[in-house]
Image (tube, rainbow, N blue to C red):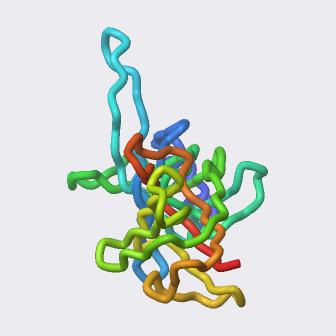
């Protein structure tokens, strides 16, 4: 029996696709299963880089590690992170295809931190503005997604609409931002200080 299990694991590992420097596009969970959509580049003919998108199915047997090799949980993965991923070459024919994830290693937390006062809360469009409410050049607009965690001073989960202008907040956000005024980026964590 053990030989059969070992042989199956060897066959699974022989059919592994690796994605280096993959970008997490989205993170979703359904009960105990996670779905991580990643995009990564593969070299094609004539040195053309092709972008592949795949949704990785993360189960209890998937190994999740941070950049230091320490175990992490599915809840630690965020949109915008760069990861190394190993997953099965057996995929669904959906768009994007789905494959079972064997191992995901975070290469870099890839986030920045901004501490500032709340200028405006747009709970209809899921935007949080920080900076001086009277000077658009000092403001930053954060996109609040379903994965964004918002906590009060005591560390309790709250909603976007619970934030008030004048609150001093610490926002962990993506390192990229738009060139608009005010600049816009995605918020991962918001904490009232």
Compared with 103, 168 (above or below) is below
Identify the residue at horizontal 72%, vertical 63% (top origin).
71
Question: Residue 91, percent across and down?
Answer: 32, 51
Question: Residue 149, percent across and down?
Answer: 54, 76
Q: Is residue 119 visible?
A: yes
**7 horizontally vs 36: left or right:** right
- Seen from the viewer's position, the closer of residues 92 and 6 is 92
Identify the residue at horizontal 41%, vertical 31% (top origin).
41
Q: Quadrant of residue 74?
A: bottom right
Q: Is residue 105 visible?
A: no
- Seen from the viewer's position, the closer of residues 185 and 24 is 185
Q: Quadrant of residue 124?
A: bottom left
Q: Which residue is the extreme one toward the top? A: 46
Q: How many marks?
A: 0
- Seen from the viewer's position, the closer of residues 136 and 29 is 136
Question: Residue 65, percent across and down?
Answer: 68, 57
Q: Quadrant of the C terminus?
A: bottom right
Identify the residue at horizontal 50%, vertical 39% (top origin).
19
Compared with 49, 139 (above or below) is below
């Amino acid at each position: 029996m053990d030989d059969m299990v070992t042989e199956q694991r060897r066959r699974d590992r022989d059919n592994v696709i690796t994605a280096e420097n993959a970008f997490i596009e989205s993170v979703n969970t359904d009960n105990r299963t996670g779905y991580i959509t990643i995009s990564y580049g593969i070299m094609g003919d004539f040195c053309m880089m092709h972008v592949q998108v795949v949704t990785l199915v993360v189960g209890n047997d998937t190994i999740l590690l941070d950049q230091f090799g320490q175990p992490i949980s599915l809840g630690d993965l965020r949109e915008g992170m760069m990861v190394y991923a190993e997953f099965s070459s057996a995929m669904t024919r959906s768009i994007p295809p789905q494959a079972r994830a064997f191992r995901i290693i975070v290469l870099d937390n890839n986030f920045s931190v901004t501490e500032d006062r709340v200028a405006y809360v747009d709970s209809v469009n899921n935007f949080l503005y920080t900076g001086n409410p009277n000077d658009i050049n000092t403001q930053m607009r954060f996109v609040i997604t379903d994965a964004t965690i918002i906590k009060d001073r005591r560390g309790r989960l709250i909603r976007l609409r619970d934030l008030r202008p004048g609150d001093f907040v610490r926002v962990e956000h993506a390192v990229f931002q738009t060139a608009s005024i005010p600049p816009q980026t995605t918020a991962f964590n918001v904490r009232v200080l």
